Amino acid sequence: MRIGELATSTGVSVRALRYYEEQSLLIPERSGGGQRHYDEKALDRVQLIQTLYAAGLSSRTILDLLPCVDAKVNTPQSRALLNAERDRITRQIDQLVQVRDRLDAVISTTESPASGCAYADALPR
């Protein structure tokens, strides 16, 4: 499939796919005229890349992990990298929970018109 078809199938922009190629995360075949062509495996690869980006992994970290993913091999280095990323994500989740709890406390405090919050009167009841 061509780059536009891959973009449509995955919901990822053509620009992002070109970026993945620049970062060596996605390697297309090239036609004689230079057009990019992707096999069906590219669909799964793009989804994996998107998932890893959404988890906050950098291009470099993803690039380091892809050979292990492709070979279906788990090395001590890849496990250490994945564990470090998991720990980082866990810390982010903990921080987000704390922020959410603070927002809940502010919401609770400002629900009363006597709170002195200028926005309290504008909030729907």
Image (cartoon, rainbow, N blue to C red):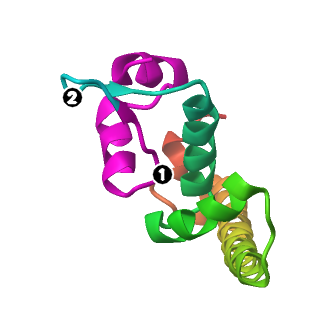
Number of the front mark, 1 or 2: 2
At label 1, the amino acid type is Tyr
Residue lying furthest front in this view?
A: 32
Reply above or below: 123 against 22: above
| Residue 15, image x, y percentages | 29, 37
* Observer-nearest of 87 and 107: 87
* Residue beneath disc 1: 119
The quadrant of the picture occupied by the N terminus is top left
Residue drawn at x 21%, y 29% as measured from the top left? 34
Residue drawn at x 49%, y 41% as measured from the top left? 122
At label 2, the amino acid type is Gly
The quadrant in which residue 35 appears is top left
Mark 2 element type? loop
How busy is the neighbourhood of tag 1: few (under 14 within 10 Å), some, or many (20 plus)?
few
The quadrant in which residue 41 appears is top right
- Tell whether position 77 is magenta: no
Residue drawn at x 63%, y 45% as measured from the top left? 48
The quadrant of the picture occupied by the C terminus is top right
* Observer-nearest of 83 and 79: 79
Mark 1 element type? loop
Residue lying furthest left in this view?
A: 33
Q: CA distance from mark 1 to mark 2?
A: 58 Å
Q: What is the magenta range?
A: 1-29
* Residue beneath disc 2: 34
The answer to whether the residue labelled 1 contacts the one labelled 2, judged by CB atoms less than 8 Å apart, is no
